[in-house]
């Protein structure tokens, strides 16, 4: 059975209440520095690629569980600056999670500063990390809310080398705070076996993998 060309592993952080603290990851005996529990995909990439045992990685971060868009508005955004500059940050509050103009990364609002300038009021919205998109005006910003009560993140970590199956990342130190705090790595195991169970007495079904679907399969 062929090995995966580019290994993909998942890291999940989870608590039942407020997420805080730090954790460390290791790979082939090399250990990262302490990472904040809400570490961005960009900063986790820098930490992992700093290890001599890992090459380049691509990382995506999502809020744990499903989310819905509470509202969208337009703002002016500055490149590589943890500020959204807008005429009026209506609808935004400290602690909100937002997405910016279709970028998959989510950002947390940690401070809103009201500045009175000639011509009106311009709010400065301080985010928990730098925005790595482009400077633009009239950018759509969406506030997202969790559908479930889960608090945390899922990181999709793709190793960009063609090394095939790799050892799993390990949680070297878990100092994440919160009730029932967890930091879990899910890796692709060599020759992993998947089991399909069917409970039916008639009908058909289809299986899908990698965006491709089978023909109709008889239940038996």
Image: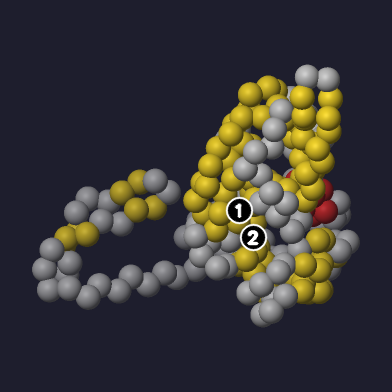
Q: Alpha-carbon neighbours of circle 1 within 10 Å: few (<14), some, or many (≥20)? A: some
Residue 9, by quadrant, is bottom right
* Residue at screen point 77% across, 67% down: 20
- Sequence-wise, the earlier of marks 1 and 2 is 1
- Proximity of marks 1 and 2: CB atoms separated by less than 8 Å: yes
Q: CA distance from mark 1 to mark 2?
A: 6 Å
Residue placed most toward the observer, 91 or 200: 91
Report the side of 67 relative to 133 (left or right): left
Res. 62 mark: 1
Question: In this rendering, does residue 137 appear at all?
Answer: yes
Q: Alpha-carbon neighbours of circle 2 within 10 Å: few (<14), some, or many (≥20)? A: many
Residue placed most toward the observer, 209 or 16: 16
Residue placed most toward the observer, 165 or 100: 100
Report the side of 161 relative to 67 (left or right): right
Q: Residue furthest right?
A: 33
133 up-or-down from 99: above or below? above
Residue 92, by quadrant, is top right
Q: Position of residue 115 (x, y in %)?
A: 83, 33
Residue 219, by quadrant, is bottom left
Question: Which residue position is annotated with label 2?
Answer: 153
Q: Residue furthest top?
A: 119
Q: Residue furthest bottom?
A: 180
Q: Secondary structure at mark 1?
A: strand
Question: In this rendering, does residue 134 appear at all?
Answer: no
* Residue at screen point 30% across, 57% down: 207
């Amino acid at each position: 059975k062929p090995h995966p060309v580019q290994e993909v592993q998942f890291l999940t952080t989870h608590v039942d209440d407020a997420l805080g603290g730090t954790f460390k990851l290791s790979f082939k005996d090399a250990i990262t520095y302490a990472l904040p529990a809400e570490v961005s995909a960009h900063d986790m990439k820098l930490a992992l690629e700093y290890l001599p045992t890992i090459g380049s990685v691509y990382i995506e971060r999502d809020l744990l569980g499903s989310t819905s868009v509470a509202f969208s508005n337009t703002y002016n955004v500055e490149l590589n600056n943890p500020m959204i500059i807008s005429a009026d940050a209506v609808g935004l509050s400290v602690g909100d999670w937002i997405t910016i103009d279709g970028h998959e990364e989510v950002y947390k609002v940690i401070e809103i500063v009201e500045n009175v300038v000639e011509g009106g009021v311009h709010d400065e919205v301080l985010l928990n990390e730098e925005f790595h998109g482009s400077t633009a005006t009239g950018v759509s910003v969406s506030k997202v809310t969790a559908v479930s009560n889960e608090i945390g993140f899922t990181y999709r970590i793709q190793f960009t080398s063609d090394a095939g199956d790799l050892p799993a990342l390990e949680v070297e130190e878990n100092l994440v705070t919160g009730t029932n705090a967890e930091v879990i790595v899910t890796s692709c195991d060599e020759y992993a076996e998947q089991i399909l169970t069917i409970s039916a007495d008639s009908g058909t079904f289809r299986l899908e993998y990698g965006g491709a679907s089978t023909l109709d399969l008889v239940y038996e």
